[in-house]
Amino acid sequence: MAKDFCLMAGVGRDQVLIAKIMAFLFRYWGAICAGYVVAAGAFAGLDGIKHPFSIVVEAITVIELLWYVCWYLPYRHKLQRCTTEDGAMLQPPPLSREERSAFFCKCLSLVPDMETFVRKWVENAHLDDIRRDNVKDWLLWGLFDRQGPPGDDNEELEEYIRMAEEKLGWEIKKGRGEANAIRISYDEVLMHHRTLLYYLFVFFVDTLGALGMWALGYTFYRTKRSNFFRVFPFRISGLLAPKESAARDHMSYYARPHKSTTKRPILFIHGIGMGVAQNLMYFNSIPKDVGVVVIELLPISARISPPLCTASQMAESVAAILDQQGFDDVVLVSQSYGTFLTTPLLLSPRVAPRISSCVLIDPVAFLLHLPDVAYNFTRRPPGRLEGAQHQMHMVARDPSISHTLHRRLSWREHILWRELLLSTAPSTAPAHVAQRRTTVILGGVDCITNPRAVASYIEFGRADCSQEEFDAFVASEKRWNGFKPLELIWLPGENHGAPLMKLSLVPLSAKVVDRYCRKDYDVGMGGGPSAHAAFNIHNKTLSRLAQLPRHRRDLPDRPSPTQRRRHPSAQEGDGNWNVCMPTSRRIKSPIMLKYFGVVYL
């Protein structure tokens, strides 16, 4: 069988070599050209330098040198600023002492390994190097959004440290050790130089992505034309596209009109990488009559652009875009960094009522108080044979992406709690269903998050499930049906990005989204006239089927009885059917139904 296509690098020396070569070229292309010029002059003299090929290389060298000196160095200095007065760094609203205490206690209760938690937040320092002042530095950043001496907050900080010591089982020594706490907002923005070759590659990918979206029937909605020179590489569509985004100041997007009367449109938010181009395989799998809004986040799309706006501004921008498209009942699909917007959107009275279901793919917003996301993005050296880690390391060192992670992300505003998905306030409750449903798709070897802790949190409501519970969960033939308020699809052996960037896994993600888009699957969940009508028809059908002999039962629009299997927990006459895909439609290995612990309906 042909090797499975994936945009993410895999495991092995060849994958690591490719990732390293790309990172080296994109960072040192100017130096390579300069080295060639020096070598040509040294070995061939004046004739070597005057050769037409050498002249081209010399021109590239001069251009890259000017780019480095005149642009990158000043740009790097600008991105290092950590002040709030000029908007360089986000400053979330301060918490009261009671709110801080409740927030800290909640985070502390969701720590699977306290020793690892403490060490990773201080760059894996030895425990002997971690003292009380080091911990206070981290607490001042995490809870108070400031740095400097504790001052009047010292008593409160000591209270938090005592609570941590109780869970640790030992006392943290007084004074200051050699450890350095990770305080992303105030630490140096870790970035690497990006040559013009890199941005030429980004321009090429962006152009292919725009052509692909156009071929799939999407229309581009640009920001105001004055932003054209603020985005590099320059985007022709940002200047010539006739339609303007409702969030014209800072958010462009692609949209396709909604034509279906039986399905909901989709609101898609991409993750870190090359923007919408990396998800073309998934967009191609969406039915043509389903409307889609694809939000563009340029600061995390390997481009030089204005900084990402605040959480509240993004929520207002999304609301304006949904108004512009006339979408009032959508399925939110967010990937990786895009899951950071889930909390602001679900807390927005203008957006939350329109979201009937959520599909969170490779979520990084769960358990954000754990050090894994911050450490893996900014501190962890790539594994020796882990191509995906080398690829993510290269992406995370992009100047604009690194600045967004360090200065434009408030973890308190973007952390996603399980309770937010399971219960809502009246002002943010979904308007078209009785209860919002959410499915989380998570790779078993995700290189960004702590996949085991996240899976435990989703399944059991805690981050420290036992080994027996975890093994039983992984080994079980878990049946996904899309009816429960919160469900998890666990992908053993799959890395970050695989669900949407691995060819064999795209149908799985598309199947989940398609289920939530279908209005007739609101049965049992309530909400909306169409859902109630479908529910009544569904009940009548099941009542009729219950009176028939089992071998004669057949559900409309379902596989034949030989291809149908009942869920063990289903009662006679209820609607909890578990139907396998017909053999002719099954997706071959590596998407084996039992392997992924999911049965398609």
Image (tube, helix red, strand yellow):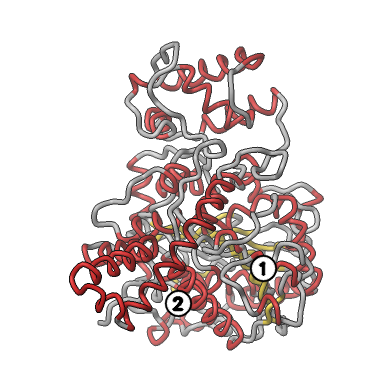
- Amino acid type, mark 2: Arg
Instruction: State the separation of the CA atoms marked 1 and 2.
Output: 58 Å
Towards the viewer: 29 or 125: 29
Towards the viewer: 568 or 259: 259
Task: Note whether residue 419 is visible.
Answer: yes
Picture coordinates of residue 292, whole percent (x, y): 66, 75
Q: Judging from the image, what secondary structure is the residue with disc 2 in?
A: strand
For disc 2, the neighbor class at 10 Å (few under 14, some 14 to 19, many from 20) is some
Can you name the residue that lies furthest to the left here? 43
Question: Would you place residue 348 above or below residue 149 in this image?
Answer: below
Q: Judging from the image, what secondary structure is the residue with disc 1 in?
A: helix
How many numbered marks are there? 2
Look at mark 2 in the image and give the residue it sits on. Answer: 564
Residue 494, labelled with which disc?
none
**Quadrant where the N terminus lies?**
bottom left
Look at mark 1 in the image and give the residue it sits on. Answer: 229
Question: Would you place residue 591 above or below residue 494 in this image?
Answer: below
Question: Which residue is drawn at the image coordinates 36% and 66% (left, top)?
Answer: 29
* Front label number (1 vs 2): 1
Task: Note whether residue 328 is visible.
Answer: no
Picture coordinates of residue 452, whole percent (x, y): 40, 47
Towards the viewer: 213 or 90: 90
Side (left or right) of 275 relative to 493:
right
Question: Would you place residue 135 above or below residue 12 in this image?
Answer: above
- Which badge, 1 or 2, is on the more N-terminal residue? 1
- Amino acid type, mark 1: Phe
Picture coordinates of residue 154, whole percent (x, y): 60, 14
Side (left or right) of 499 relative to 356:
left
Question: Which residue is drawn at the image coordinates 20% and 74% (left, top)?
Answer: 44
Picture coordinates of residue 429, whole percent (x, y): 76, 54
